[in-house]
Image (cartoon, rainbow, N blue to C red):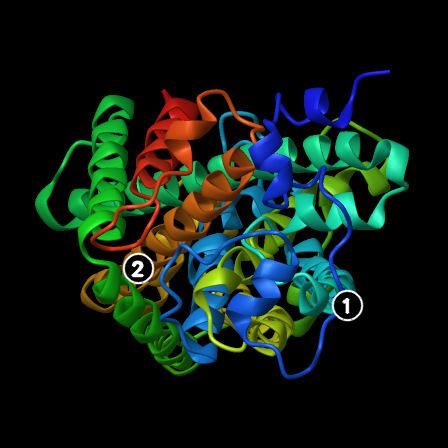
């Protein structure tokens, strides 16, 4: 059977000595220890700058969940899997509405469990470190390696999805406002520009990123209130409650309603992805053992409530279901705004959604880079010595930031 060192990518004796997942169990925690002392007990030296408050770090998780990004990007999927090209309706309004409620509740249960573990192990390593400490000793390294790789790949895919969604919505806005012809190539170029922006911000504007994450919370809250308020007040007509809560559509060609529901749930599940982001930022947060768990739970339940209100607002305001699906913009939420509020109002509120998506992508690159920084620290990525380096000026993992951005680009090209 391979050794723990082999399973974690060939750790050196120095790696193990400083507390990589193959090291011995941590000493018991005293309630009076500092964040740095607790991190040392877990086997790591404080390297990243611990400059974030509890609210700043909550803002990262809330921004990554971002109901204005996730719900809007995959609203098409809830209405019609794969888009009009495939013509496969998966659940429709009923699954959009009740799927959000069910997935949000289950995510909250998972979040409560993660919060409990995070309070004991507040490290940027997050899930793979927890897996190692909770697994049976002889298989702990394997579980850590397995969990870590899935987490890294998932984070990269999420960053790609968020910024590609932002590029798609930005292309739709440019089309509406300036007649910009939307082509796959142009959307990819916008995607690359957004990733470049987020990489630069996370490299040179560390303090600006913290400020923008805090602003993002209020952008999401106020933006949601304005959008839902406008959709509730301005349109002359709305869909009925029976349409929103009970209309179920199955044009997939499959007879199984369960299959259709499971496909429709992907919109909600995608949106809640990233709720563990706070764990990856704990080495930069004051009072991490307390702030981390609270941030995880708060980001989930506040997003759960906000997303439910947002989805109700959009679904009630649909003027033409088929018209939204077949929108020339390629994004049904944009068409719903245009149909319900007119061209001027629709485009203005579309900008609010695009702003939220840009905030979300920026925060995703931040959390993604911290995971990429932590995993090589334990020798589990190729060229690990490069990816866990930290800038002496900003005390941030610059190499990990650009690996996250480049890897996300590769996901869509």
Image quadrant where residue 153 sits: top right
Q: Is 244 located above or below residue 33 in the figure?
A: above
Q: Residues within 10 Å of mark 1 (few under 14, many from 20)?
A: few
Residue at 81 percent across and 37 percent down: it is: 140
Q: Looking at the image, is 250 positioned above or below residue 119?
A: above
Q: Is residue 25 above or below residue 195?
A: below
Residue 412: image location, x then y, percent: 40, 25
* Residue 28: mark in rendering: 1
Which quarter shows the C terminus?
top left
Q: Residue furthest left?
A: 178
Indicate which disc residue 338 carries. 2
Disc 2 and disc 1 in contact, CB within 8 angstroms: no
- 355 sits left or right of 259 in the view: left
Q: Considering only order in the chain, which callout, 1 or 2, is on the residue closer to the N terminus?
A: 1
Residue 204 place in picture, x, y as percent: 18, 52
Q: Secondary structure at mark 1?
A: loop
Is the residue marked by circle 2 packed among few (<14), some (14-19), or many (20+) residues within 10 Å?
Answer: many
Mark yes or no: residue 330 visible.
no
Q: Position of residue 96 (x, y in %)?
A: 64, 56
Task: Please state which of the two labelled residues, at mark 2 or mark 1, is closer to the viewer.
Answer: 1
Q: Position of residue 368 (x, y in %)?
A: 45, 45
* Nearer to me, 314 or 56: 56
Query: What residue sits 27% from the left and 68% below the top?
Result: 212
What is the C-alpha distance between the residues marked 2 and 1? 58 Å
């Amino acid at each position: 059977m391979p050794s723990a060192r082999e399973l974690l990518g060939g750790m050196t004796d120095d790696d193990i000595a400083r507390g990589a997942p193959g090291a011995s169990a941590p000493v018991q925690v005293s309630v009076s220890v500092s964040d740095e002392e607790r991190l040392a007990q877990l086997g790591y030296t404080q390297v990243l700058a611990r400059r974030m408050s509890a609210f700043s770090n909550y803002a990262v998780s809330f921004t990554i969940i971002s109901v204005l990004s996730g719900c809007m990007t995959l609203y098409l999927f809830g209405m019609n899997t794969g888009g009009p090209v495939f013509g496969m309706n998966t659940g429709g309004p009923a699954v959009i509405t009740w799927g959000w409620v069910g997935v949000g509740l289950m995510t909250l249960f998972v979040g409560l469990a993660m919060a409990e573990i995070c309070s004991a192990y507040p490290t940027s390593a997050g899930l793979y470190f927890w897996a190692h400490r909770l697994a049976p000793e002889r298989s702990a390294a394997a579980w850590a390696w397995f969990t870590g790789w899935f987490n890294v790949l998932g984070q990269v895919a999420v960053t790609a999805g968020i910024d590609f969604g932002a590029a798609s919505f930005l292309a739709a806005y440019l089309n509406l406002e300036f007649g910009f012809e939307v082509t796959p190539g142009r959307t990819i170029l916008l995607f690359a520009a957004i990733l470049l922006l987020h990489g630069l911000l996370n490299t040179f504007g560390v303090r600006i990123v913290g400020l923008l994450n805090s602003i993002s919370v209020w952008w999401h809250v106020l933006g949601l209130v304005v959008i839902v308020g406008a959709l509730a007040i301005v349109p002359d007509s709305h869909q009925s409650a029976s349409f929103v809560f009970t209309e179920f559509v199955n044009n997939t060609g499959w007879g199984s309603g369960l299959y259709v529901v499971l496909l429709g749930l992907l919109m909600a599940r995608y949106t809640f992805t990233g709720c563990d982001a706070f764990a990856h930022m704990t080495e930069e947060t004051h009072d991490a053992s307390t702030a981390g768990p609270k941030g995880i739970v708060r980001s989930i339940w506040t997003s759960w409530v906000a997303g439910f209100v947002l989805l109700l607002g959009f679904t009630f305001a649909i003027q033409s279901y088929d018209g939204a699906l077949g929108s020339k913009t390629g994004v049904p939420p944009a068409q719903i705004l245009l149909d319900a509020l007119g061209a001027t109002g629709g485009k203005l509120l579309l900008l609010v959604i695009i702003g939220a998506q840009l905030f979300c992508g920026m925060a995703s690159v931040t959390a993604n880079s911290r995971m990429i920084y932590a995993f090589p620290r334990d020798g589990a990525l190729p060229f690990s010595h490069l990816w866990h380096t930290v800038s002496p000026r900003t005390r941030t993992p610059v190499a990990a930031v650009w690996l996250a951005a480049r890897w996300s680009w590769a996901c869509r090209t």
